[in-house]
Amino acid sequence: MASLQMRPEDWLRVIRAEYLGDFVLRGGAAVKFAVPAGEMERSAVQVGLERAAEEGGYQFAGVDSATAKVHMMDKLFHEVARQVDWDALAVRFVAGLLEENGYRLPEDAGRLDLHEVAALNGYQEPELRRDVRRWLVGRIYQDSGMSREFRIAMLRLCQAQLDPTDVSPIESGAIKEWLRGELRLLSSLKPSLIYQKIARHNARPMLASLVRWLRLTGSNGLVLGLDVTQVMADRAHTPEGYLYYSKPAVMDGYELLRQFVDGADELSNCLIVVVASPEFLTDHTRGLDAYEALKLRIWDEVRDRDVPNPLAALIRLSGSAEERLPVYLEGRADERHG
């Protein structure tokens, strides 16, 4: 096993420059595995990743295996959805659509009123309402880059921002509950023509649709920080209130990660960083050795003898490591952030 490590701040600097500032920004997607040596390095990665995402214009979502069932794709999507301001995205999209078509907007950009927009631009409200509905259908419902249910949900949320009589607060609230996995009765979505819950079979396309929607609303994409530290804990070392993962659940979680790695080309503008404990590399029962399909995809079989590769799929991080970035990468990072 390789023992080469690098400091979290050095690795995050490369993530900013090579991925968030370049590859992901231009439409790429990547899955990275970071193994911090201790709690201090783990915290540094979590805080640094969120800061890098926000400064880079990305939506950040942090998911912790201690409180979210990360081995189930639908539960993972619901946890991400809880961290998204769906109304703000809808307002942003509608405002951009109006500006794109030459309309001036009220000073209060946080709310949109068709009557006010029509009056501000000397336009008849019924005609503006008709045009906006046509634009929304053309730009959202006919966008094949998003799944059908997701398109319908976003279309209704956008319509709700313009006319509460068209889409009631009850209906828009039900849509957001559906996205967050909190909807009790699916029948409340009949007016939206949504007839199925988000489950394992459709959660992955929903995540891809969310990333697409983020791009359409002006974000640079999604950064997902997925902490799987709790997955390694056995029952005896699981604190009260934390989730315990049985061996089958651990394997399901690794298969989910394997699918993320293999399906990276199906995403765009997305960076997934999986943060694991050192036991992920050393525990032969619950760690990476227990699921060879994932190990074969991320293990660094070929590596430099003296210098860690910050672009590798799997990186070990330690605050006390003496290794620094290779000179050519350090120069590129400095150049981009200068």
Image: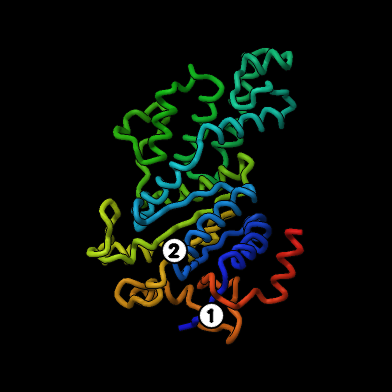
Counting from the top left corner in percent of width and height, residue 25 is at 65, 55
**Colouring method of the image:** rainbow
Counting from the top left corner in percent of width and height, residue 139 is at 61, 36
Task: Give the quarter of the figure containing the N terminus.
Answer: bottom left
Location of mark 2 (residue): 39
Counting from the top left corner in percent of width and height, residue 98 is at 67, 27
Q: CA distance from mark 1 to mark 2?
A: 18 Å
The amino acid at mark 1 is Leu
Residue at the outermost bottom position: 305
Location of mark 1 (residue): 4
* Above-or-below relation of 165 to 68: above
Q: Residue at x 55, y 58 (%)?
A: 271
* Residues packed near mark 1 inside 10 Å, few (<14), some (14 to 19) or many (20 plus): some
In front of the other: 101 or 117: 117
* Above-or-below relation of 245 to 60: below
Counting from the top left corner in percent of width and height, residue 180 is at 40, 40
In front of the other: 237 or 263: 237
* Above-or-below relation of 208 to 109: below
Q: Residue at x 64, y 26 (%)?
A: 109
The amino acid at mark 2 is Glu
In front of the other: 73 or 53: 53
The quarter of the picture where residue 78 lies is top left
Left or right: residue 230 compared with residue 331? left
Q: How many marks?
A: 2
Question: Tag 1's secondary structure?
Answer: loop
Left or right: residue 145 compared with residue 247? right
